[in-house]
Image: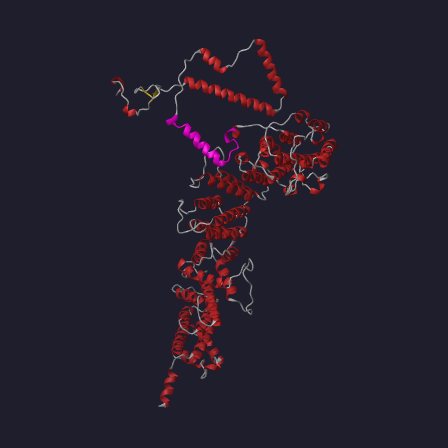
Amino acid sequence: MYGVCGCCGALRPRYKRLVDNIFPEDPEDGLVKANMEKLTFYALSAPEKLDRIGAYLSERLSRDVARHRYGYVCIAMEALDQLLMACHCQSINLFVESFLKMVRKLLESDKPSLQILGTNSFVKFANIEEDTPSYHRSYDFFVSRFSEMCHSGYEDPDIRTKIRMAGIKGLQGVVRKTVNDELQANIWDPQHMDKIVPSLLFNLQSGERTESRSPSPLQASEKEKESPVELTERCFRELLGRAAYGNIKNAVTPVLMHLDNHSLWEGKTFAVCCFKIIMYSIQSQHSHLVIQQLLGHLDANSKNSATVRAGIVEVLLEAAAIAASGSVGPTVLEVFNTLLRQLRLSVDYELTVSYDGSTNIGTKIIKAHEERQLQEAVIRTIGSFANTLPTYQRSEVMLFIMGKIPVPGIHLTLPSSDSGPEGTRMIQVMLLKSLVQVTAGFQTTNILTALPSSFLEPLLSFSLTEDPEVRLLVLQILLSLIDRHENRPKFANMSSISDISVLKLKVDKCSRQDNLFMKKHGQQLYRHIYLGCKEESSGREHYETLFALLGLLSVELANEEVVVDLIRLALALQDLALSTDEALPVYNRCAVHALVAAYLNLICQLTTVPAFCQHIHEVIEVRQKESPYLLPEAVFVDSPKLHSSLDKVEGSVLFLQSKITESLGGSGYNTERLATPYVPQYTDEDRLSKRKSIGETISLQVEVESRNSPEKEERTPAEEITFETLKNAIVDSVGMEEQERERRRQVVEKFQKAPFEEIAAHCGARATQLQSKLNQIFEITIRPPPSPSGTISSGYGQSQSRSVPIYEMKFPDLCVY
């Protein structure tokens, strides 16, 4: 009987005998290494037997798992691992199927130790580069099981941590095994990414940190004991680093959904941490794809709470700061269009207290302070995006934002808003604040391209509004664009110091473009500075900013002609402060005097004309003794010391035009132009806007349109037209021949000697007069065509034309075809 058994045992296949020999009698003794070496040699010598070896090992492992003989299970997995590492023949695929079947069996077990054992074996397998492709292998089960392990809720915290870390390592192994193999199932498909990414974020969130550790993947030693958070971050970085252009969307979408589902936008910290990891891990040329997805998600949440939208905007801000220059992508203006649209919606929500435009408060209560925080975050984000753009693209963005701002006197281009004039004013302020952010740090060598007419003219029109906040924003934008040598901070404190060398101003010679710019736009700038000083609502910040603007013009763009005009402007401002016709408050008049003193003190030292400097310093010394309230040191402080009346401001405390002209004339400056007082030009822009606020401008437009509507139009009674009527309409009076010659001589002399501003003002007045005369002629001569329906009589006995549709008119038979 024993001989028969021995005979049957000897007849068993050799591979089975070799497999059986690696298992000791006592599983605690571990794998029999000598017999394992024999099995490995046999597998390498007869690779066609490898699949049978794997199948038999799998059979034994399944039997041992069922019988709870876990020691033999570990020995079997160790043997499988060694065979995998040693064999790379063409028959490896069939062996791998048996191996994965055994790993699956372990992962399905309820024992944490077996789950971890199976995971470790899978990770070792994932690091093996196979020589032959596999067409039918599937990893769907492993993705699902490893994701489930990442969310383990085991009672023992230590074991729970080990299970979660095993799940993370398993997901990392699946990614490594499939991401570069085109024959495998696409791991980037949403069905897989929706499991992998949330599992990683769940573990990352469990040990949330305030900031990402470094912009590069963590280089942790294998001997170091990693925490689940560190391991998760390393795995997440590796996943994102392998993402190609077409896979970025599938990788980022689950992140957005996870943050939505767990309300993680409001805290901001974790969301910012996640996207820092994303932006640092993906390839830099793909950064704009992440930004576009965030913008789309912001639009999708446009009716969500302000804290959620603010969280998305904060993430955008951080992402833009990390992104390389120009990485916003090809749709630059679309980025800013989305942000500006969110800004407008936030203003509407704040004022209407509703997400649907009605005044009824719905289920969501809108808090004004949260909307304000969102608006500030959007403005900062716009500036952050602008800082990543090259100069030419930033100029386009400036024009784009300017085109979105409602300009006084021009119909609004923004979508209609239910928030009324106040909402429009707020939108105006917010967009100007956005422009302040975009222009901050803007550097250009050509001022003509930085401030084109299409941008400068609408910008300056805002300086005519009565809203002091709008005017201040306009001045700040101008300062950012004109300052090309970082001189602006040096004009922050207005003073009348005797030596400006301590300011360390950077003065460069004006280029040809600078001269052309001042010839083209200089008078506009002077006029708006003058009118800005004339506003009663101007405060300390306005005057300090106006001084900085005058200083920058003198340092950045001033040639001899510009210097002369700026001095004339300063003297005109002094006359404005002395004038009693304008009814300026005492503080404003003192502020203008102080502004003039500080600026003339600056410009005289820049021109380095001794006589000019002497006169300015003499006047300042007299003011220090007799009238300190006319100097910036006494006016632009927290508690200004003002005089009750400025009626006695005269004599030696004033800067004299005659002395300034005389002192500068000896140095080659144009004395005739200096001797001519500056008179600001009033244009159609002034007459149209009347320096009204945007709300008043809109109501004025509505009133004018209603008055000009056809329903209320009244007929002017016709007059008889004769030759004398036409003659009197065109020529006001006819003088004698001698008077005509004298008048012509005076006109020629005036055009030869008068300053340009006076000539321009005169021509503008004549053009207006001629237009009014032409309007009178057209009103008399142009009559409406006769109507077949005749006229109807109004209630006051006057004839009034009646409009009859063409199909109701009765025509003679001869006229009908």
Task: Please state the horizontal and vertical placement of residue 676, each as a whole percent of the image.
Answer: 65, 25
Q: Is residue 795 above or below residue 283?
A: above
Q: Where's residue 331, x and y in %? A: 47, 45
Q: Is residue 674 left or right of residue 226?
A: right
Q: Quadrant of the C terminus?
A: top left
Q: Residue 302, position in %: x, y?
A: 43, 49
Q: Residue at x 48, y 33 (%)?
A: 697
- Evaluate whether residue 389 shows in this view: yes
Q: Is residue 770 above or below residue 309?
A: above
- Does the magenta-highlighted stretch encompass residue 702? yes
Give the answer, above or below, for where 151 lies relative to 490. below
Task: Tell me if residue 769 is in the magenta stretch.
Answer: no
Which residue reaches farthest left?
Answer: 813
Whether residue 510 is visible: no
Which one is in front, 62 or 493? Answer: 493
Residue name at image x 48 percent, y 21 percent: 772
Give the overall secondary structure of the magenta segment. Answer: helix
Vertical placement of residue 642 versus 13, above or below: above
Residue 352 sits in which quadrant? top left
Indicate the position of residue 211 as horizontal and vertical percent values: 54, 58
Q: Which residues are magenta?
A: 687-712
Q: Nearer the viewer, residue 648 or 123?
A: 648
